[in-house]
Amino acid sequence: MTPDISLSQVPAHARHGSSIGRPLTRREGVLKVTGVARYAADNHPAGMLYAVLAASRIARGRVTCLDVPAAMAHPGVVAVMTPANRPALALDPDAKLHPFMFRLDLLQSDAVRYANQPIAVVIAETLEAATEGAALLAPRYEALPARVGLDAGESFVPPVVGVGHPAEQLVGDVEAGLASAARRVDATYETPAQYHNAMEPHAVVAAWDGDSLSLDMPSQGMAMAQARLAGLLGIAPENIMIRSPFLGGGFGSKGLIAGPQVLGILAARLVGRPVKLVLRREQMYGPVGHRPPTRQRLRIGAGADGTLTALAHHALITTSTFDDFFEPAADASHTLYASPAIATSHTAVRIDTGTPMFMRAPGEATGSIALESAIDEAALACRMDPLAFRLKNYAEVEPISGKPFSSKALRACYAQGADRFGWAGRPLAPRQMRDAAGMLVGWGMGTATFPALMFQAEARAVIRRNGGGVVEIGAHDMGQGAWTALAQIAADAVGLGIEQLEFRSGTSDLPDGGIAGGSAHTATAGMAIHAAGGEAVARLAELAMDDARSPLFGAGNAGVVARDGRLFRRDDESRSESYADILTRAGLAQVEGRGKSGGDPAAQTAYAMHAHGAVFAEVKVDPDLGQLRVTRLVGAFAAGRIINPRMVRSQYYGGMIWGMAFALHEEAVTDRRSGRMLNANLADYHIPVNADVPEMEALLVEEHDPHVNALGIKGVGEIAITGTGGAVANAVWHATGMRARRFPIRIDDLV
Amino acid sequence: MSFPLSLTINGVARNITLDDPRVTLLDLLRERLELTGTKKGCDRGQCGACTVLLDGRRINACLALAASCDGATVLTIEGVTDGDALHPVQAAFIAHDGLQCGFCTPGQIMSALGLIDEGQAGDDPERVREGMSGNLCRCGAYAGITEAVLDAQRRLAGQDGRDAS
Amino acid sequence: MKVFDYVRPASVAEAIAAAAAPGAVYLAGGTNLLDLMKGETLRPDRLVDVTRLPGLDRIEWLGDGGVRIGALVRNAALAHDAAFATAYPAVAEALLSGASAQLRNAATVGGNLLQRTRCAYFHDPASACNKRQPGAGCDARGGENRLHAVLGWSEACIATHPSDFCVPLAALDAVVEIEGPAGRREVALEALHRLPGDTPERGTALAPGELIVALRLPGEAAGFAAHARYLKVRERTSYAFAVVSAAAALRLEGGRIRAARLALGGVAARPWRARAAEESLVGVEAGEAAFRRAAEAALAEARPSGDNAFKIELARRLVRRALALAVAGTPARIPALPASPFPSVAGARHDA
């Protein structure tokens, strides 16, 4: 008999004593505000040496000469690692055994395939010596012409885009839909290459002990890194210990182990001492991924009443010459707007760049800003309010698949966001509003959406006789709040107050917490914790219900509820017993549960699963000077159950700022001749500063989803980028009449 | 070539023999004095993660040569707490969720201390935002940071008022 | 960073002697020099640390009502000096619009005058740059140059001077005091920075080993205090270099312009004093027509050096705006966003 101990049947907030849903402050907050939180580069094992990369200054060709003697002659330099002496690998770094195995530059040859590719590593007693040693290598090259930009070569249809999605998808007859349309939009938008720019540069502190490897290294996926390293190094995964308690931001760039981190490990192998390798900021623009540039053509047809007749979205993207990552930009058109005909397609061009990689809302962000701009253009073509137009084409089922949504509170998002923003009464035409100082004022909106994904994870839960509990999972906190939100789920899972719970996370010797990506970590790790806690509680319940001395004896099918360190009979809460009493009587020190999580294929087949939102933006533009400020942002998002509203709101704020930056700030500028990035620094690659950030509101719209997972959790980490970029661009149009077709919007476009 | 260097760091006088003139204040703190709370985000004065107070003024430690700081007083994030008690600025950052990944946080807090001491911003959020713009936060915790600075400033002013009375 | 000799002289004379060594450079705040050294743009052999030189960290008021600012006065200290900000509000506003609070606390007045260009090709040692390596060529020509010079550039170099501070200084006839191996001399700030011509490697009028010891603003320039502004268009709201900037200062009498000062930033290898525009304004009624003529005059010789024609029109409009705001009067307090065209009020509701 399996007792019913499901915790998810009652909404979390309705349950007495629940940690889920509480706006707790960050549990690791004190460590972070005191400087005690230890990031990878803060470690300094005894005998440690410093390693510094030398990076290529050409984008294509080969290294013909490195002045190793000059570097070695520099006082303090211990070794120079080049293709000639790099320790052997068990696996070719160019091998690709599965689609998630990305090729790495590990000094396998003298070939250069992008600027800033690692070409050597200098190891020295001090950081200063290693840095200068790298400069003294003074590499010489045989350079070939660099291929730069979206027009650098012949385009092709990629085999898949994103995570195994078809490059082309089609429902209905788009050409017929366009032909029959009373209103048409045909617009092309360009988005630039962008870089993750986590504040913490990629780092590794590596120490070998025989064939065992100890690593301090920021990772969004420790188990995957362990497996990748094991393959490359020819050692058992369990011999690799990764500590990644805190990431200084990841945004996708730390999802898979990066080549430079492996080089740090190899450097430690070479010199037989612990080594620290931290990327210099300018080296973050090449070997650790980026969001590729796109050129997107949107063709939209609509009837005179605003009903869509066709939506065609084509994205031209770039990827590297040596690997396959294809940004699924056009897939953004799959889910939001009902249209009898939808066609999405991708073509790609190979250029001399580091391989692009997942970057916060990969594809969703790039596609969204184009789609939301084009939808705005279509609304205008139909002389409709942009919100009314979106409501007119509200998708009741997922347009590309015809599946029902597992839940969709987008209407509520539109309504609450519009109300909060004060959208009603917005003039249809541009350049109608000014503030007291004469600045043009514009209002724009965009729809946000992001898939609700589930990956796989494992967790372990222990309930102890002393009334405490331990939950263990190798999860990852890159700022989204895993230390707090997962502990909240864990506390509920074992029926303890969060203060009675010890939550262990952030190291690879714990159960595999999966990957912190795809906005799926809280759901995935949370469900593993939920299952593990449930199993531990079930063990306790069996002990109690089978024991005639327990007040819960014979509870049987009625089941029990776990709360505050006690089990309660569900149908009679006056009958309960503490964990301590149950375990003491059973003579056990503790009970343990293990849990796994993963998507439910049946539910995923039956339902389309997405979070939704609506973002409203106000901008002001100086009519003469083109100087522009976003002055208000209001987002309303529905993402299933909210574990911690304080942290969720912060995720939305962060996403909205990224969306604003997509529209207005971020752009990698590359020299068309050399292929070198010209603004590979934080002064010239603009990410928003505090003064750029307007008054923001993020409304948490209630949504109950019975299908995504038992806890009803969707993701919140990426959705707010989508929608926001378009909202800002549309507000700029509304203020100025200038329709942005290239991002970021520049002053040049506005004067 | 070695340089004797005396610094007062977090209230402790330190006599340091520097064997390399290239060492920045940031690398001295992080790599030689085990004060790793101060972070290196760009090493070029472009992000503010390495903000410390040098003789009471907030600066980027990455662009200060350690040798040139001889005789100076340095306050880093490790010296901000009063025993076990968080400084009001630290407490406010937690309360307003003015942090996510936490990597820029020590620099933000040191910058906030400098800003409050400068006394230029008052309780005008726009001036606080401008005054805190030398500290990038890629996670986008700016709204909470601004609220935290304003809140802490009010609390500190209140404390001063009580002390005076 | 290359190993260098670090010396800390006790007097100006010692400093100048120490800087006579080949490959020597002066170190003050370090905010620009260390950045350039870390990027391998500069690889000096000796750093002469002038930060302890006595007497160079003072702001002294002069008999004519002018001010003498020691070269080691920190940017922030100068900007927040109440008497200085009152007499020279556009200079204070320019200072506060530059960089970040941290950098302004470290950067010195003397060092700031010698700030190097932000041209990416100058900063990238792998690119051809005549300024960094005479005769190497200029990769900025034909490269990514939408932010490059539109005035005073040459085929050899199209870089701009990035300073905010220097723009109102040029407008207000600041004078730079220099000590060097050949003794003491003065140059007008306007003449400190050189246009590139065929020798872009010589960015300033300083001879080798010369040290800026002070900066003077004449008392006459304080006569503009009631109508002086610095305005800056930039690509993010703060902590960004100017796309184009303008300093405008006027003396008005009954609606007529008695005297005018105008300089542009971000448009040339030096802060660009627009004398013809100033002359066009003198004696005329302050108003849009006069500002339009001044803007035309200021940019009369402008031509794009690349993909940057927009900067010419933008500069014209900025001149007009800066003049209009100068007429409106210096704000009682430096705005929350110094030098921004926005009069603040982020987030305020519109009144459509």
Image (cartoon, coloured by chain):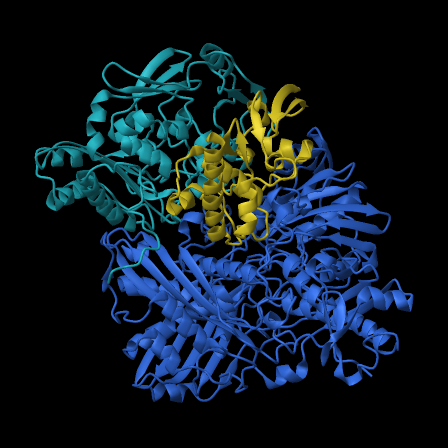
Chain colours: A blue, B yellow, C cyan
**How many circles with numbers are drawn on the protein?**
0
x and y percent of residue C178 in the render?
Answer: 37, 17
In the image, A582 versus A390, the foreground residue is A582
Above or below, A648 against A411 in this view is above
For residue C172, say whether it is visible: yes
In the image, A492 versus C210, the foreground residue is A492
In the image, C279 versus A673, the foreground residue is C279
Q: Residue furthest right?
A: A587
Above or below, A312 against A646 in this view is below
Q: Residue furthest front?
A: A574
Q: Quadrant of residue B120?
A: top left
Q: Quadrant of residue C65?
A: top left
Q: Is residue C344 left or right of residue A714?
A: left
Q: Quadrant of residue C99?
A: top left
x and y percent of residue A71 in the render?
Answer: 68, 34
Give the position of the N terminus of chain A as an image quadrant. Answer: bottom right
x and y percent of residue A275 in the render?
Answer: 74, 42
In the image, A63 versus A43, the foreground residue is A43
Give the position of the C terminus of chain A as an image quadrant. Answer: bottom left
Q: Is residue A561 left or right of residue C147?
A: right
For residue A63, say whether it is visible: no
Above or below, A432 against A105 in this view is below
Q: Residue at x 22, y 45 (%)?
A: C321
x and y percent of residue A595 in the render?
Answer: 76, 71
